[in-house]
Image: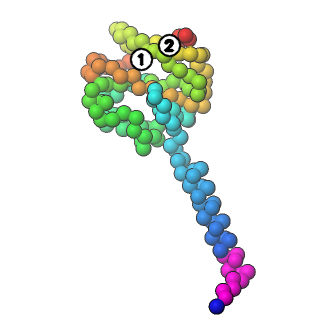
Amino acid sequence: MEMYIGKKEMLIILAIIITILIAIFLGVNFGKLGYDYETIADGIIIENKFDNYDSMLIKNYDEYIELLKKYKINEQVFLTNGDLEENDYIVDFINYDNSLKIYNINLEFTDDGINLEYEINKEINDNSKKLIYFIPINKNSITDYKLNNREFIIK
């Protein structure tokens, strides 16, 4: 028994194959809409497309999850609940490109707030990406967080 596939059947099969390929392409390329991020050892890199990048203090896992939701990266887990039981974290936002390296961070606590001094490998310019940088500090060492000054020193 021979099976004959006519032109009409061939066109239907071809249309199905093309539809499947288009769906795969769209799923791969657009499946992460709103979730443009990458993780590195120092933090989470996001696209610079939000209005507010204010440095802040997070003291518990719920605040951390809210931060991730705000920047639409809530499927990313960089810190765990255990991390936030041991430390509080200063969250800072830094313009980022792939060759930026942070060697050291010095914190200075003053009456006016906290001064952050980053030792880095090159000058930081405006960029299409931001690094959400998590700086651990002793649990409950500060209650009211205010960033007073941020300075970058090229080493």
Q: Is residue 75 above or below residue 6?
A: above
**Residue at numbered disc 1:** 147
123 lies left or right of 150: right
What residue is drawn where x is 51% and y is 38%? 37
- Residue reaching furthest to the bottom: 1
Q: Earlier in the sequence, mark 2 or mark 1?
A: 2
Residue 68, image x, y percentages: 42, 37
Left or right for 98, reference 83: right
Numbered tag placed on residue 114 in the rendering: none
What segment carries the magenta color? 2-12
Give the left or right position of residue 3, taking residue 82 as reference: right
The residue shown at (36%, 8%) is 110
Q: Amino acid at mark 2?
A: Glu
The one of 148 and 45 positioned closer to us in this rendering: 45
The location of residue 13, given as percent across then percent down, is: 65, 74
Residue assigned mark 2: 119
Mark 2: secondary structure: strand
Q: Residues within 10 Å of mark 1 (few under 14, many from 20)?
A: some
Residue 155, given in percent of the width and then of the height, sits at 55, 10
Query: Compared to 47, does 114 lie above or below?
Result: above
Could you say which is closer to the camera, residue 69 or residue 104? Answer: 104
